[in-house]
Image (tube, rainbow, N blue to C red):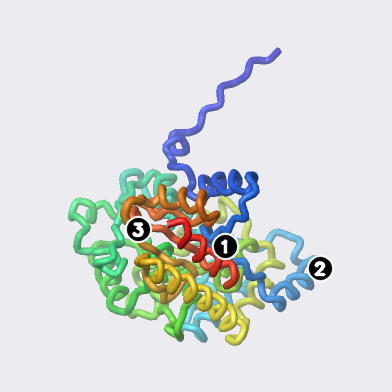
Amino acid sequence: MSKKISIELAARVKHLPPYLFAAIDKMKKEAVSKGVDLIDISIGDPDIPTPWHIVDRMKKAVQNPEHHRYPSYEGMPAFRQAVADWYKERFNVSLNPQTEVLSLIGSKEGIGHIPLAFINPGDVVLVPSPGYPVYPVSTLFAGGEVHMMPLLKKNRFLPDLKAIPNDVLKKARLMFINYPNNPTSAVAGRDFYKAVINFAAKHNIIVCHDAAYSEIYYDNMKPLSFLQLPGARDVGIEFHSLSKTYNMTGWRIGFAVGNHAVLAGLGKIKSNLDSGIFQAVQEAGIEALRTGDPVLRKIRDTFQGRRDILYKGLKGLGIEAEKPKATFYLWASVPKGFSSSSLVAHLLDKAGVLGTPGNGFGAPGEGYIRFALTVPAKRMKEAVERIGKAL
Ligand SMILES: *Cc1c(COP(=O)(O)O)cnc(C)c1O
């Protein structure tokens, strides 16, 4: 009999915190196996299907044998052109599709890979906290050090750039920012982006703006693109995703735009690791980017209706919350007597409602719970009722 080898995880994996949503998934499975009629508003995965014209284009594209081969690394010219057209139309920003647009297998893929292109061991990456867990993890995978920038209510959930110590700034090479923000739902204005551009230019820091939620906004207040600000293209790039905008989370398609040298660095990593996006999916992506405003308005109206139910409902229960101007998340304060985790466990146990503990997005998220607007209005009403009874 052969001897079993000992299988040891690498230090970078051993020292990882458990992926937030994996832990929640486990709690969820336990509840469901006990027969709980669960209202899951924990994860940002829209329940609304992908608009049909996009699915239809995919059905046709998949039959084309040209698409059955390896795609190009950087994205089909037609897809990159569609991105440039969308940017011009949506933000009035002109992009060169050859040099300033890079396709991604979902924006998570690009966010996960970019530190590998620019971070040496000991370099610092500035990361918002609470924030999308991939920013710190991708930093650690590249051997970088994470410096957390707390997002606090008193600063309207924007990082305080002046609070970053000088010795950190000397080692900082890259920063992540994300507006409209997951998990706080905060939006950023011109002044903030201007400050970021000046800060990045002064300290020679690459800015990676994650704009996954730029199209999920309410009350007709359209979020800005970072690239609308003069000088933005000199310091960084913007990540976009078709996942949230077009309810396409499962399709795995996104893109990055902006500074050519930064995109080229990311492209170099990608060309050694992946082989691009299935071309049929890129064709569907082109179709998605050409979606008319009435379809998108309907999606936004659906989320806005749910937002109003949840926001008003929680207010009625005396729970303090930020009224989302964008994103499909609601960031609520945990009532007295609970921590983020104890509230999530309590609501799962007593109400069959699953939220996400704020501290799972980073220590400054303690004292908050995040709800996602990803169930129909009727279920949202029921969630509010059940939360009311459980508290
Ligand atoms: C959902 C999400 C993403 C990733 O989206 P993809 O499906 O990988 O394109 C990126 N950033 C934030 C903040 C998100 O919430």
Q: Please tell me how crowded label 3 is: few (under 14), some (14-19), or many (20+) other residues with Cα within 10 Å.
A: some
Q: Earlier in the sequence, mark 1 or mark 2?
A: 1
- In percent of width and height, residue 164 lies at 22, 57
Disc 2 residue type (three-letter): Gln
Q: Do the residues under discs 2 and 3 have CB atoms within 8 angstroms?
A: no
| Sequence-first disc among 3 and 1 | 1
Q: Which of 54/25 is in front?
A: 25
Residue 351 at x, y percent in the picture: 52, 55
The residue that disc 2 covers is 63
SS at mark 3 in the image: loop
Residue beneath the point at 37% across and 73% down = 187
Q: Residue at the spot x=58%, y=78% of the render?
A: 299
- Where is residue 311? Give x, y as percent: 43, 72
Q: Residue at x 30, y 52 (%)?
A: 147
Most distant residue in the top direction? 1
**Residue indicated by mark 3:** 335
Q: Residues within 10 Å of mark 2 (few under 14, many from 20)?
A: few
Q: Can you see residue 118?
A: no
Q: Secondary structure at mark 1?
A: loop
Q: Amino acid at mark 3?
A: Pro
Residue at 58% over, 81% down: 296
- Label 1: which residue? 45
Question: Which label sits on residue 154?
Answer: none
In the image, which is nearer the foreground, mark 2 or mark 3?
3
- How far apart marks 3 and 1 lie (CA) works out to 26 Å
Mark found first going from the N terminus, 2 or 3? 2
